[in-house]
Image (cartoon, rainbow, N blue to C red):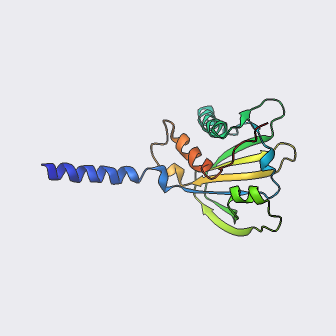
Amino acid sequence: MKKYIGILFALAVIAMAGCSPSRLFVEHDYSYEGHFKNYESFNFLECEFVDSTLLCSDIQDAIRHQMEARGYRVSNRNPNLLISYNIFRSDLRFRGYQQPVIKDWVVREDDDATYKRIDYNLDEGTLMISLIDAESYQVIWKGYASKMMRNPNFKNNYFKGIVRSIFDQYPLMATAR
């Protein structure tokens, strides 16, 4: 009997691992034009998910939590960063870049750093989060997670884990002024 319970437990763990966010493909890119040392505040651009305000709320709450954990504050007046996010409802080809680790680049701000182009085939349901310099309207950082809709249980704060996985790629803290 104990043998069967052990086998059932092992099968349950394997089945749950198949649905975990660890199977996500998560990556990011950033712009060498970003002034990462100068950003301290943010706000959101309008949510584009007309069919689900709950989805907007869940994703915005998760992003807000990650930004505030890094010392950024929400600002309705003159934020340094604007945040945009989107879930792509079909597969897409996306051009990413291999770059120096962002934290290292911010310390050195190496003008000779180059981008190495990488083409990705991202799955339906890719969540893409963009940080936009509010003054220049340039995207300065983009994080994305693919394969997230393969989990049938994506309700109940599912996006918190996805957004955290994306923001694990953004180790920078807000400037203290």
Residue placed farthest to the right in the image?
Answer: 136
Q: Residue at x 39, y 52 (%)?
A: 17
- Foreground residue among 151 and 90: 151
Quarter of the image for the C terminus: give it.
top right
Q: Residue at x 49, y 50 (%)?
A: 21
**Residue 83 in the image, given as x and y percentages of width and height:** 73, 42
Residue placed farthest to the left in the image?
Answer: 1
Numbered disc total = 0
**Residue 29 in the image, given as x and y percentages of width and height:** 70, 58
Q: In the drawing, does residue 156 fall left or right of residue 146?
A: left
Q: Is residue 84 above or below residue 76?
A: below
**Residue 169 in the image, given as x and y percentages of width and height:** 62, 53
- Foreground residue among 143 and 45: 143
Q: Is residue 31 above or below residue 159?
A: below
- Foreground residue among 73 and 93: 73
Q: Residue at x 37, y 49 (%)?
A: 16
- Foreground residue among 126 and 2: 2
**Residue 87 in the image, given as x and y percentages of width and height:** 63, 47
Q: In the drawing, does residue 86 fall left or right of residue 18?
A: right
Residue placed farthest to the top in the image?
Answer: 76
Q: In the drawing, does residue 151 fall left or right of residue 141?
A: left
Figure quadrant of residue 118: bottom right
